[in-house]
Image (tube, rainbow, N blue to C red):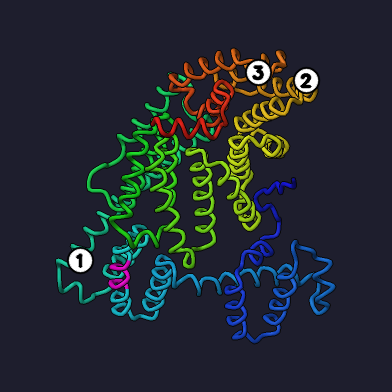
Amino acid sequence: MKFNHVASNTQDDQLISLINSLTKAEKRNFKLYVNRLQSKSDVKFVQLFDVVDKLEQWDEVVILKKLPSIKKSQLANLKRHLYKQILISLRLIHIQKNVDIEIRQQLDFARILYGKGLYIQSLKLLDRIRQTAMDNHQDLLHLEILEFQKVIEERHITRSRQTENKVESLIEASYERSKVIQNSSKLTNLKIEIHGFYIQYGHVKNEKDVFIVKELFRKRLREIKLEGLTFFEKVYLHQCYVWYYYIMLDFEKGLSDAQRWVRIFEEHPAMKKEEPDLYMRGGHYLLTCLFNLKRVKEFEKGLKIFQKFGEENESEMKVVSKIIHFLYFSMAKLDKHYLDGSFKEGIEFVPHVLKKIEEFRHHLDPHRILVFYYKISFQYFGNEDYDTMIDYANAIINMEVGQLREDLQGYARLIQLIGHYELKNFELLDYLAPSTYRFLEKMKELNEVQKATLTFLKKLIKDRNIGHRELFIEFRTTLHQLSKDPHSRRALLYLDLIPWVESKIQKKSIRSVVRTSLKKN
């Protein structure tokens, strides 16, 4: 089996990255745009576009050979000019899809009118786009418009001066919008800070971690106004809480805030199209919490809503939104098959995932690939296809990602050992087991689940008895005890071996164990 170890786009040349990202429609629009340009230099940059468009990677020798009229000394300037013109042509397309780009253009027009001495016309235009900014919750642009209006009112005698209330209203609106932006900034700072803690330390592992996270969150929250919030302030607040509870492993409360996050968009449906990425992130965390709580029916309902949103809006989505929908939907879909034991259907979904990974290969980072491979490996684990499970575990182990998601790399090594145990590859286990032990023991913070699994596998490998039921019963007891420890729950979600252990004890398939457990719940 061949695996494409996709990394993020690391090409040094920004131009070829931009051209590679263009859709057919965007390339066609660019050609229509440049047809209006007539100079010799413009002809040359169009020629450069045509050559680069056919290249997979930047090759200066090939480019100069294909374009003999262009000197090497001219190439740097032509690249900059071409890059700029592509962005201008893209702006002309996206201005119709992005209200913030449209407002900025109108704001530019207002500045041009003012510069021409037509400040009354400028004010009229600013009044109109100010309402657009307000209706679409564009707080920063709203404030910029207000500040420009204040400049005009300060420097000139306008009709507004004849109505004292209008000027006072302008000053009050500016004051209020400044407070909103300051509060929003504090909320986004908290969101980034709490997320940064997770990136550096992960979920809380002990009471010391709990104390640190609580104090950090409470201290920052005291600085933030929590009443009378605007659309984005509300979303950012619940986003902060979702991350806080996620780190604290309190998925019940995290679910509650994720639901409120999504509900805000439901109450403002137009914002789903204006901010689809933020809406989908809310849906993603809602599904993540439901998955961690193993609420299958609610999860399936949420997944259908998420899928429907993508299908109904795909034609209008930007590339980044399509990628986000693919990532969150596909991961949730694999989670769904894991939750309800439909591993065979999960495996049937895998080719689609791999195809999309290839399609978005220039945009996906190694972390995403690691997570996908891990989730896919568990589909094969559940289907008891240990050969293919090992293939995906090996793909994770062999990826050159340094210490990125060291926990997943450790879990992959453990399920690799389980796969070889099931296949009775004991001679191979004698070789692989010591390297796995060394890797795990070198990890900065080996959790209790990893330690217990490692101890159990050592006993299995040493015993070499496939039917040693007593060892599995003993390990099941250990896992149930660890499940009561709040700091071990997250590890058990990543390394959920209970269905496999039960299948060995009950002499049933993993799928039937999961289905039976589902009926009981």
Q: Report whether 246 appears left or right of 440.
A: left
**Kind of element beneath mark 2:** helix
Q: What amino acid is at disc 1?
A: Val
Q: Does the magenta run of residues contain 462?
A: no
Rendered location of residue 51, percent (x, y): 75, 73
Image x and y of residue 67, in percent: 80, 76
Disc with the residue nearer the chain's start (3 vs 1)? 1
Q: Residues within 10 Å of mark 1 (few under 14, many from 20)?
A: some
Would you say 1 lies left or right of 328 here? Answer: right
Work out whether residue 382 or residue 487 is closer to the camera in this orientation and state it. Answer: 382
Magenta residues, start to end: 126-132
317 over 4 or under it: above or below: below
Query: Label 3, on which residue?
Result: 467
Q: Is the stretch drawn in magenta largely helix, strand or loop?
A: helix
Cα gap from disc 2 to disc 3, whole angstroms = 19 Å
Residue matched to label 1 = 167
Residue at 79%, 76% in the rendered image:
70
Asked if labels 1 and 3 touch by Cβ distance under 8 angstroms, the answer is no
Closer to the chain start, of discs 1 and 2, is 1
To which quarter of the image does residue 158 belong? bottom left
Q: Position of residue 397 (x, y in %)?
A: 70, 34
Q: CA distance from mark 1 to mark 2?
A: 82 Å
- Residue at the image point whose x is 29% and y is 63% from the top: 134
Picture quarter with the C terminus: top left
Please rate how many residues cluster around mark 3, counting C-alpha atoms within 10 Å: few if below 14, some from 14 to 19, many from 20: few
Q: Which residue is mark 2?
A: 430
